[in-house]
Image: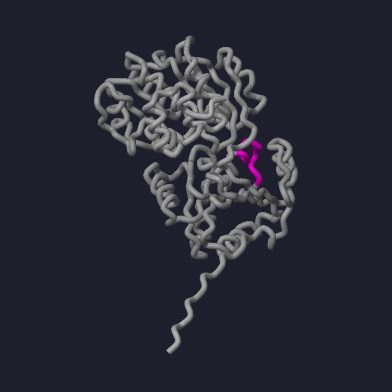
Amino acid sequence: MSNSFEAMGLLPSLCTWAAQAGMEEPTPIQQAAIPAALAGKDLLAIAPTGTGKTAAYALPMLQQLLESKRALDCLVVVPTRELALQTARVFRTCLGQKADNSRQKAGTVAVIPLYGGADRTHQAERLLHDGPRVLIATPGRLLDFAEGGEILLESCTRVVMDEGDRLFSPEFFEESAAIVSLLPPVRQTLFFSATLPDALKQTIQQLLRRPEEIRITRSTDKRGPIRQGALFLEPAQKTGFLRQFFMRDRTNRAIVFVKTKAEADQLAATLKKARVQAAPLHADLSQTQRNATVASYEAGKIMVLVATDIAARGLDLPAVKTVVNYDPPDQPEAYLHRIGRTGRAGQTGSALTLCAAAERKKLRQIELGASVRLRILSQEQALPDAPEAKPTPSAPRS
């Protein structure tokens, strides 16, 4: 496989923009996916989170748009608003754009995220762009525009299904199937995911046409190790332990995953009372609130996000040191997506799962399904090391 973007046949301008964004060498998923996508092949690409999957399809899609003499549409379907915004940022970075530019010149490539919870009229105005477009959409909002005649899905001959395992899970299956039915039968389809449950294999056969299959089973060299452990606690003990956990080290940048929105609100409020900089993140918050919370976390004003699985995919948050599962998740795939939020950019990460006696069977299912062995910890072992106190300068001698 090629060890440079230039050797894979990407345009010089795309190579320059990739370098400016810090992408000096292609990751394994990019080395495998970019040449195949440029050749027009369908892809089934499975790789861990944090390995550069978005750029692996963004760069070849942008090249196809830049080289075309017609105003084409490329479509990227994603499950959440946060992933739509994150994906749009990657596309703009690959185009050398530093920020969202709603008023682009005719003929240039427009990157247009479409998702619910935002001003539909503004999104509709952006769809009037006269030139090639990258449409990055959540299923519900995409169908809304398609049914209104504002997007013609039969013109989308290049399609990406990102986080495809979730798009074709029961949560989104009906909407995703409706989208596929509106796409042209002759098209290039790229399916990207970190996991591929057995239940999806028949769906994949119907979605893709003689795909090139790519499986990256390990992280890139720039990904740090993740220490994974479990602590047995009964439900009534978990909140008190986490209060102690974050009071021990208030600089610990962390995400705590919970099952429900109410749990996220309650636990965040409890931690805030203990003077831990915490905030909830879930779907009942407005998009403005969610964006503000993520921005505060990125700026270091919030140290702990208490989140539902809305934060398990797509959010590329900086320097997440610890991921805590308040309960064992229901599926091994959810566990892998959650812990993928830490251990990025070569940093060491840790993942701790709190498990009640009644949840032991679920914990074992995660170990088997995710092919991991969790170290069983005592409460003292599970607590973070207290940060070293800075030495106090000695007073000058008189």
Instruction: Residue at 60%, 63% (x, y): give it.
Output: 244
Instruction: Residue at 35%, 33% (x, y): give it.
Output: 96
Task: List x then y, in percent, for residue 296.
Answer: 41, 52
- With respect to residue 333, does 42 lie above or below? above
Where residue 122 sits, quadrant-wise, is top left
Q: Is residue 393 magenta?
A: no
Task: List x then y, in percent, for residue 176.
Answer: 50, 23
Q: Is residue 15 visible?
A: yes
Quadrant of the snapshot with the N terminus: top right
Name the side, left or right, on which 75 lies relative to 267.
left
Identify the coloring.
one colour
Instruction: Residue at 45%, 15% (x, y): give it.
Output: 182
Name the side, left or right, on which 229 lies relative to 114.
right
Task: List x then y, in percent, for residue 193.
Answer: 56, 29
**Which of the pair 28/254 is nearer the observer?**
28
Q: Is residue 335 magenta?
A: yes
- With respect to residue 328, does 95 lie above or below? above
- With respect to residue 214, does 194 lie above or below? below
Where residue 150 sits, quadrant-wise, is top left
- With respect to residue 81, does 68 lie above or below? above
**Which of the pair 261/39 is nearer the observer?**
39
Instruction: Residue at 54%, 57% (x, y): give it.
Output: 252
Quadrant of the snapshot with the C terminus: bottom left
Residue found farthest to the top: 186
Task: List x then y, in percent, for residue 328.
Answer: 66, 45
Q: Magenta segment range?
A: 328-336
Name the side, left or right, on which 10 lies relative to 359.
left
